[in-house]
Every structure is written in C-alpha cells, then in structure tokens.
Image (cartoon, rainbow, N blue to C red):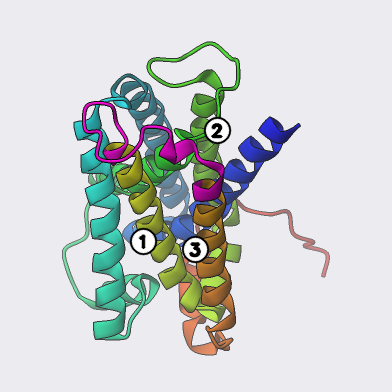
Amino acid sequence: MDLLLEYGWVLLVLIVLEGLLAADNALVLAIMVKHLPEDRRKKALFYGLVGAFFFRLGSLFLISFLVDVWQVQALGAIYLLYISINHTIKHFLKGKTKTDEAQDAPKKPKKQSGFWMTVFKVEVADIAFAVDSILAAVALAVALPPSGLPNIGGLDGGQFIVIFLGGFIGLIIMRFAATFFVKLLQQRPGLEVAAFLIVGWVGVKLAVITLAHPDVGLIDSHFPHNTIWKISFYFVLVAIAALGWFLSSKVEVEGSENAIKEVEEQQPAKDTDTSK
C-alpha cells in the first residue's frame, strides 16, 4: 500500500508540473501555427505532437540505459538548475513571464513559413520542451523504491512506467487541457515562477543522486532513499507550490484574454448547438 501511495504521489506531482510547463509550451506552439489556415493548423500540431510522442518514448528508452551513468546524472542536474535559475532571473529582471513573452512574439513581423517548415519547427519546439520534462521525471522517479516489475534498461519497470505516464499525460494536457492551465497561469502568474523553482529543486534532487553515486561517493549511497530526505524534499516542493499560489495576487484576465484565445483556437473542436 505504501509503495502504491509513493508511486501515485510522484505521478501526481509529475502531472501538475507537466500541466504548468505544458501551458506555456501550448501557447508557443499555438503562435507558431497561427499563420496557417485553420484546418492546417490542427494538422501541424497533430504531426508535431506525434513526433514529440515518439521522441519522448525513444529518449526514455535511451535514458533507461544511461540513467546509472553519473556523468549523465550530473549533466541532467546542471541543465535543470540552469533553466530554473535562468527563467527566474529573467522573470524578476524583465518583470515578464514566459507566457507574456510568447504572447508578444507575433507583434514582430517576419516571413511566415510554409506548412511542412512549420511542422518541422513545431517538432523542434516539442523536442526542446520534452528535455526538461523528461529530466525532471527521471529525477523524481529514480529514487522510488523497487516495484518488483522487470527492469527496462537500467530502470525499474515501475519507475519506467511512472516516467512514461508523466510524459504521455503532459502531451495530452498540451493538446486538450492547455486552455485551463494557460488561464490559471494568467490569473496566478506566480505559479509559473513556482513551476520553474520546482524544476530547480528537482535538479537539486538529481544532484544529490549524482553525489551519492558509488563512483562519486561524496555522500552516502543510501541518502537519496532516506525517509527524512524524501519527506524534506516533498515538503519543500509543496511549500514552493503553495507560496506560488498564495503570494501571487489573482489577476483579472481581461488584458491577457488573447493568450487564452490563441490556445483555444488550436484545441480540438467541441460540438456546438447550431439551433440557437
């Protein structure tokens, strides 16, 4: 029962983190395809997401074989810390969120790409978005206790499933639930900063795992699995999210409605009542 709770908790954290990160990503993708005719926009996004799915799956299989290499762990920790610090500094220096910057992008006139070049750009953007999500998922999952399922590469089968589900759900959110998360970030802009601070904190977790690696040995190899460390890690993680919510004044979305509309236009069409 405790095993299921721990795995379920990590999966829940991944889903929320993926949702907050996917909101920005969905807005960027919506802007990238905006110049295409409506029917081709959805095709471009669909092809991009299909490509992103196979990239995430392939990357996950590759990482599963390299996850125990301490150099890979170290690079992953450095990358997560970099994007967290870089985003936070930019936010406080410029006073703009990543969503605001994406919303401002269309105001700069530039030559529009054709359909397949747009698809290619969407693919590249999806791949870039996938890197931090995959690394964060790996960092959260590798410290989970063994599930008893057969190993896949260097990963326990249960850990592999959690990482896969986190990435897959992230893609679903980006395609079907992005409007909700974009609106949430517009109303509570502090959540975006909190999301990237959490990414940085996950980077710290991956750094701890690296330092505890048998070939590095700077801290005890059992420390990443220590109950006190796990409780402390998730306490800080939840505290960051709570502070992001409560310290962020609720903002009316009047001036930001365009950002929401950008994403809504790319969401799957819903049945409407035409009799009215």
Q: Residue at x 58, y 14 (%)?
A: 149
Q: Mark 1: which amino acid? A: Val
Q: Mark 2: which amino acid? A: Val
Q: Mark 3: which amino acid? A: Val
Task: Tell me where residue 31 appears, x and y as whole percent.
Answer: 36, 63
Tags 2 and 1 touching, CB below 8 Å:
no
When asked about the image quadrant of residue 62, the answer is top left
Magenta stretch encompasses residue 227: yes
Magenta-highlighted residues = 211-229
In the image, 93 versus 2, the foreground residue is 2
Quadrant where the image shows the C terminus: bottom right
Q: Nearer the viewer, mark 3 or mark 2?
A: 2
Q: Earlier in the sequence, mark 2 or mark 1?
A: 1
Q: CA distance from mark 2 to mark 1?
A: 27 Å
The reply to whether residue 138 is visible in this rendering is yes
Report the residue marked by disc 1. 28
Point out the residue furthest to the front here.
220
